Amino acid sequence: MTPERDTSERDTAARDAAARDAAARGTLERIWIKRAKRGPMDARPSASLRANLGLVGNANQGGRRQVTILDADRWNAIAHALGTDVDPSVRRANLLVRGVDLTASRGRVLRVGNVRIQIAGETKPCYQMDEALPGLQTAMRPDWGGGAFGIVLDDGDIATGDAVTWDAADPEMHRRLFDKRAE
């Protein structure tokens, strides 16, 4: 296969995935703010976000891990596999979303309400998961079970119940920002 054809097929696949994802509509179910590292996760009905910083009042500000996001459906599958009904707040993510698949989403842009978040990577589960429930860390490792983390692109406010969608406005963003082959 020629490099031009490989790029063309990859671009077509990216556009097809973006169109499919644009039709998917999820919901923001819960919001948590972490006051301090290892501190409690405070549930909130709404929150403010600042571009390139993260959630206002959250311990993590700036860098690439400004917001952490957990897929509610994936969390429920993990809890079911462990035979428990553990609350998703033990994951220590900032946002719990339902109806959008975070798997392999690095570089994509997630729209939560009117705020865009660029997914910068997979949130790897740490030892704190086993402190909450023995075996949880191992159960969360496959298939982005720990969720994703991202960079806030816009200032804005979000609230539980807000729509969550993949932003199809720029399906090439992943390749430009994260795909080393495109350089």
Image (cartoon, grey):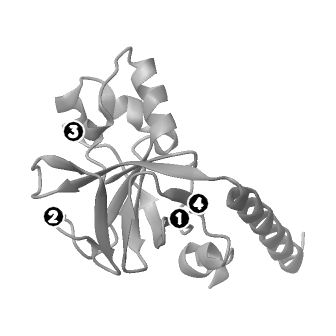
Q: Quadrant of residue 82?
A: top left
The image shows residue 116 at horizontal and vertical percentages of 48, 72
Q: CA distance from mark 2 to mark 3?
A: 19 Å
The secondary structure type at the circle numbered 2 is: loop
Contact (Cβ within 8 Å) of mark 1 with mark 4: yes
- The amino acid pointed to by label 4 is Thr
Who's the residue at 33% across and 63% down the image? 67
Q: Is residue 130 left or right of residue 171?
A: left
- The amino acid pointed to by label 3 is Tyr
Earlier in the chain: of badge 3 and badge 4, it is 3
Furthest residue in direction top, as rendered: 83
Earlier in the chain: of badge 2 and badge 3, it is 2
Q: Which residue is mark 3?
A: 127
Q: Which residue is mark 4?
A: 165
The secondary structure type at the circle numbered 3 is: helix
The image shows residue 92 at horizontal and vertical percentages of 25, 46
Contact (Cβ within 8 Å) of mark 2 with mark 4: no
Q: Decide: few, some or many residues near mark 2? Use Cα within 10 Å; few <14, some 14-19, many ≥20.
A: some
